[in-house]
Amino acid sequence: MSFFYLVEQYREFDFQQFFAQVTDAAILRSLAQEKPDVVDFLNLLSPKAAGHLEAMAHKAQQLTVQYFGRTIQLFIPLYISNHCSNQCAYCGFNHKNDILRRKLSLAEIEEEARAIARTGMQHVLFLTGEAPHLTPMEYLEEAAECLKHHFASVAIEVYPLEVEEYRRLQQAGVDGMTLFQETYDQEVYRRVHRAGRKMDYHWRLDAPERAIQGGMRLVNLGPLLGLAEPRSEIFFTGLHARYLDDKYLEAEVAVSLPRFNAAEGDFRPDYLVDDKTFVQFMTALRIFLPRAGLTISTRESAAFRDRIMTLGATRYSAGSSTGVGGYAEMRVGQTPQFEITDERSVAEVAAAIVARGYQPVYKDWDAIV
Amino acid sequence: MKNDVLQLGGVTFTNRLFTGTGKFAANALIPQMLAASGSQMITVALRRIDATAQSENILAFIPKNVTLLPNTSGARTAEQAVRIARIAREAGCGDFIKIEVITDMKYLMPDNWETLKATEILAKEGFIVLPYVLPDLPLAKRLESAGAAAVMPLGAPIGSNRGLETRPLLELLIENCRVPVVVDAGIGRPSQAAAAMEMGADAVLVNTAIATAKDPVAMGRAFDQAVKAGRAAYLAELADQSDLARASSPLTGFLDE
């Protein structure tokens, strides 16, 4: 059974109608549950629950401290290629965009790794676009093996792979996998993914599950908030995480909630998620998934990241460059995949975490296992 | 009480509260907590030790007079646990090792089978092995035979703060094990630590409840007091419990006058 089976169960479900009948009493009941179910999760995602945000934040904070302590795990992304055959309407790496395309050589990856390692970062996430003919498995394996020498944990955010391919990367030293479904709404998915392998909704939807089957310890899911109706997107993200968590006891599941940011091109998202709603989503996810990692990237501003640190977040990227390379040397004319708004250095983000009474954790894993 | 000490692997402990290094808001709190609680043994996950100079090394926060108990957190097989233990010893973390093999990320239940296999190997290599297990008496006896220095059964799932949910099983271990029994995981309150010690546990290991308290230093002190009170009560031999009230001036006392 694929997670798609669960998605299909909600095909006829009218989210707006459900949200319209949610009462304060129902929200309070859901907040008091020790093991919230999907109905509780929906109640907490309803517009009405915005009136209970303070109580949600308290519960989210308490659960996060219990399961993770007052800590924030740091990681850094490294784009090794922006070649891409997809045409995602919202993405700076869209095949149709006339941007400088490049792929780092192994020597350049090595150089970037050394530069990143100097910041103290121990967890690295390497990324590519979807162009398997230019960045084939062998390239990904070599990149992983190279990075493994410099970091305690190496994770991937690359195009969806087969189980056996995930296993090969796991054997090359990769322990985590991030992949965003972008949208769980099949209609919107079709509309914004205009060409390339990424047009296949199912292939992408099942990739995190294949990654676990291939031996990945950690999978990180997420919607790209703004493409489709956001409350239902968060609902499916939570459901997806719980599905994997229930089915694979050996896996750690984390979620991201990237919201739309300007990228190359003129894409205007249909939905905007304001800060208050973002916090509601984040705390609802924490309450529904108490043990899940919650990743906040540098898409969010420094000021906002400093504020939400204590409300359920567990993983922060820091010092990020979202163009290819970008750590060993300044590369002019590089188009980022998306614009970052928290431009602080690793040391500055770490200092901000300490200032909030939390501990920045550089190393929480070791490739020896 | 003066001579009530715990011997483990040739080391004498006068304090029966073991602590952990995880989940603290700042590593600088660790030495303060150790000073306040009097804890003489602290566990640290090898995977958290960062030998590179850029970020702070957690080992620098552990005073020399406190015994380091490296643990194999992250291991999913006996083989991985063995490898981590060897690396810990080579890294200068000493001969103590807490074996933690967890294959289930949902409930974080220890895998008793893999833990036993790792214990057999590491005890032969001269490690002082403290296996973290589900409280299972036949397994505990096998761990003893394999050379474990103690057994560390859980009271409740890690970090759950739910206390001694496995109490009847813990009692079997405490009554029947030759090696010390250290109740590890699940203890969320000093009163639960005291209860474990009253039952006759030789020590308790507490991390989350101390590290995530608003004031971890004061909470460390509170746990120390609770552990001492529970131990003293155990040594003083608790009066039997009874469902019936027993008046301190018995109703029929006059018949003997």
Image (cartoon, rainbow, N blue to C red):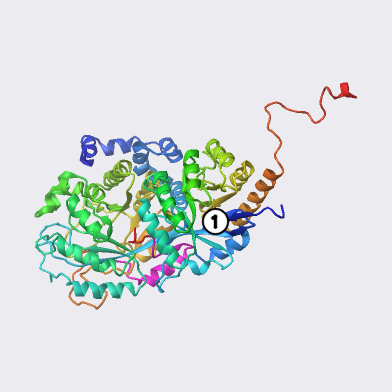
In the image, residue B235 lies at what x, y percent?
69, 45
Residue B42 is situated, as x and y percent measured from the top left of the image, at: 53, 59
Q: Quadrant of the C terminus of chain A?
A: bottom left
Front-lying residue, A368 or A298? A368
Which residue does the image show at 16% across and 48% down from the upper left? A203
Nearest the viewer among B2 and A250 is B2
Asked if residue B166 shows in the view, the reply is yes
Q: Which residue lies furthest to the right in this view?
A: B257
Q: Name the residue under label 1.
A: B19
Residue B70 vs A346, above or below: the answer is: above
Image quadrant in which the N terminus of chain A is located: top left
Q: In this view, does A163 lie above or below B93?
A: above
x, y percent for residue B125: 44, 58
Check disc 1: other Cα within 10 Å, few if <14, some if 14-19, many if 20+: many
* Residue at 58% in and 64% down: B32
Residue A356 drawn in magenta: yes
A313 with respect to A262 (left or right): right
Quarter occupied by residue B48: bottom left
Chain of residue at mark 1: B
Question: Which region of the structure is painted magenta?
Answer: A340-364
Residue B159 visible? The answer is no
A9 up-or-down from B211: above or below: above
